[in-house]
Structures are given as structure tokens and as C-alpha cells.
Image: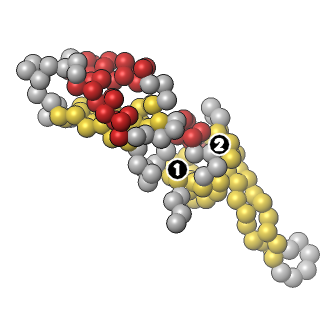
Amino acid sequence: MFRDTVKNLLDEGLNQREDLFLISFDVLPDDTIKIIIDGDNGVLVEDCIFISRAIENNLDREEQDFSLEVLSSGATEPLVNIRQYKKNIGRTLSVKTKENETIEGVLTQANEDTILLEWKSREPKPVGKGKVTVKKQVEMAYDAILKAQVVIKF
């Protein structure tokens, strides 16, 4: 089957480049192949070309007419892979939980099961008037996250 052939070629290409990983793979009914990749050190145009060639050079357009798109995961795209969380340690994330709560904080840890977010909050002093800055943190399991995105600041 065409989809299986393409997936095998994609896997072979990714095996040659262990710094790259798959975010999404789809073959549409019109045989348009759409692949989104990310990398532990980001993704360059050359990385997309490498994956594209790994697939395209091993398919025969005489046998199968197809279109191929290999894209990098955009900065505004939600994080979907544990490796994406790990590469974004130190950056600010906006995380929407399954309880419909939104938390914005610096990603300080990401392991196989959870992430740790930290942020500062201004809260009333326990005694007396005024406010004090308090450092807060929350550890969250990946399955509690509905959507997480890197916050881009200018």
C-alpha cells in the first residue's frame, strides 16, 4: 500500500537523523503526502530537504502520482511530543489543562511523565498591607495537558 511504503521511507530517513523526529504524517486521498518534523536543535530547510529526498528518491512517479510537503513544526504550533517539551526547557509556555485552567510559566523540567512550570506572582502579604512577590510552581502530567504552546515575546 502507498501509505505504508511512504511511512517506511520516512522512518528510514528519520533513523539516519536521530536529531529529527516526527510530529505528524498524513497521506490525503489525492496522494498528497504531508509531513511535519521537529528537531532537538530546531529544523533547517536542509533537514526538510533531507527527509523529502529520502522519500521522493525512492518512489517512482510513473507508478504513483503524488505531491510531497515536508514542513517544520512552527513556533506557534502546540507541543505534541515529549522531545518538544525537553528542547523548550527554559522557555515560557502557556498551558491549558483539561480542567480548563490556563497556566503561563517557565518550563524548568520535562521528563518522561511530567513537566514542571515556574512563575512569579504578586500576592497580598500574610501580615500587614501591600504585596509580596511569590515564586510558584506546578508539576503536571502530560495527560492533564489539553494544549501547550511556547509564548513568543518581543
Q: Is residue 139 visible?
A: yes
Q: Which residue matches tag 1? A: 148
Q: Residue furthest right?
A: 127
Q: Which residue matches tag 2? A: 115
Side of 78 where 33 appears, left or right: left
Res 27 → quadrant: top left
Mark closer to the chain start, 1 or 2: 2
Q: Nearer the viewer, residue 98 or 29?
A: 29
Side of 138 where 7 appears, left or right: left
Res 72 → quadrant: top left
Q: Residue at x 32, y 18 (%)?
A: 8
Q: Residue at x 70, y 54 (%)?
A: 118
Q: Is residue 143 visible?
A: no
Contact flag, marks 1 and 2 (Cβ < 8 Å): yes
Picture coordinates of residue 58 (x, y %)? 23, 18
Image height check: is 51 above or below 143?
above
